[in-house]
Amino acid sequence: MLLGAIADDLTGATDLALMLSREGMRTIQTIGVPKTDLDLSDVDAVVVALKSRTNPAAEAVAMSLEALSFLQTAGAKQFLFKYCSTFDSSPAGNIGPVTEALMQALGTDLTIVCPAFPANGRTIYKGHLFVGDQLLSDSPMRNHPLTPMTDSSLVRLMADQSQLKVGLVTRETVGQGASAVAQAFEAARGRGEQALVVDALTDADLRVIGEAAAGLTLITGGSGIALGLPENFRRAGRLRPTGDTLAFSAPAGRAMILAGSCSEATRGQIRTATEAGVPTLKLDPIAIAEGHFRVEEALSWALAQSARAPLIYSSAEPEEVKAAQAALGRDSAGSLIEQFLAETALGLKAAGVRRLIVAGGETSGAVVGALAPDALFIGPEIDPGVPWTLTLGQTEPMALALKSGNFGAPDFFLKAWDILP
């Protein structure tokens, strides 16, 4: 194995696994640290999907170090800590504390911080993270119910979350090529800097940064930073010129959509689906908490629909989310919906649903935790960063599309089915 990755949520892990697979690495995504032996003899990269983004920092660190230990034992040569391209985190972490702990465990003195993903509009300039043409702090992420992002300076965010000395490599240096970036890394070492935010506006920038990072033990960032990493192994003669293409076959069965994300993108996808005539059922967290609406009722509604893929969702406008959080507590409201949708997914599988879209990182983590596959095989891409996957290690596999709340075009819920074989 060449590359070992730790992702702080499930959809981000899938996004990264897709990126590596597309660049020619045979990639497996595990659901947490594997409890059983996996055959990794033909695998170039393993992505361990954790659910650690919004956990207490100490818990996220412990989970990440356990994943690191597994990847080290499996023989990984380089390590990647993957987090969201919008740097989803709280003032206490978890990106800073996990990065610091991984650096200490690996005995490395320098890493990079680069969540850029230009294909989805995430770019970094002068150390500031942009979402489209907006600063992160001006984007809809400022209203995220769990990790509201009110600062766009990655240098400041990383310094506030950790004890690391944080520096910056600007776009001007990146534009001069990989050797200039590598020289900037060495200069930063001389200044005692440990975490370098690196500007990136295009995929070409990410490939330059990836090439310069060939000698780093640990890299941190979004899935986009993986663009340039496989080629480093290929240049060193450790990776085949082209990757093997493996067939993806989705199991036959009914289809369904579950959405727990309250992001602007997911809300738009729900509106588009509704306008196209997709049957929808909106969940009320307060009614669920008071016992007025149960999983059995959601299943009864879903299985009574004749449409290709009905939609059950809890996604709501920011004002509705705040009202539910005020009534139930911020963490309790989110956990309640995640558990409800996870139990719904189990019921749908028992009823013969074999094709399932799940929207939202936390929701996807809860659903896959309930379905409990050993790993996921990466299939065709629906939109940038979102592939179909196939569950492994189960007698009744399912095709799952696990979508980060912020990802996907407005018609995602409509077109995803058309690319399944």
Image: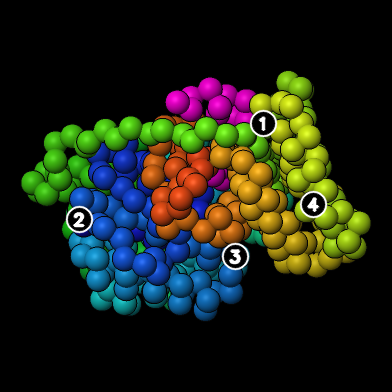
Q: In this view, does 279 lie above or below 179?
A: above
Q: Which amino acid does label 2 sit on?
A: Ser
The answer to whether marks 2 and 4 mark residues whose Cβ atoms lie closer than 8 Å is no
> Neighbour class for label 1 at 10 Å: few (<14), some, many (≥20)?
many
Q: Which amino acid does label 1 sit on?
A: Ala
Dot label at residue 296: 4
Residue 300, position as x, y percentages in the image? 80, 43
Q: What residue type is labelled 4?
A: Glu
Dot label at residue 41: 2
The residue lying at 51 percent from left, 43 percent from top is 398
Pointer 1: what residue? Answer: 309
CA distance separating discs 3 and 1: 30 Å
Residue 306 in the figure: left or right of residue 363? right
Q: In this view, does 279 lie above or below 3?
A: above
The residue lying at 22 percent from left, 37 percent from top is 243
Residue numbers of the magenta segment: 402-421
Q: What residue type is labelled 3?
A: Thr
The residue lying at 39 percent from left, 41 percent from top is 378
Q: Nearer the viewer, mark 2 or mark 3?
A: 2
CA distance separating discs 2 and 3: 33 Å
CA distance separating discs 2 and 1: 38 Å
Residue 156, position as x, y percentages in the image? 51, 62
Q: Is residue 320 above or below residue 194?
A: above
Disc on the earlier residue, 3 or 4: 3
Dot label at residue 54: 3
Q: Is mark 4 on a helix, strand or loop?
A: helix
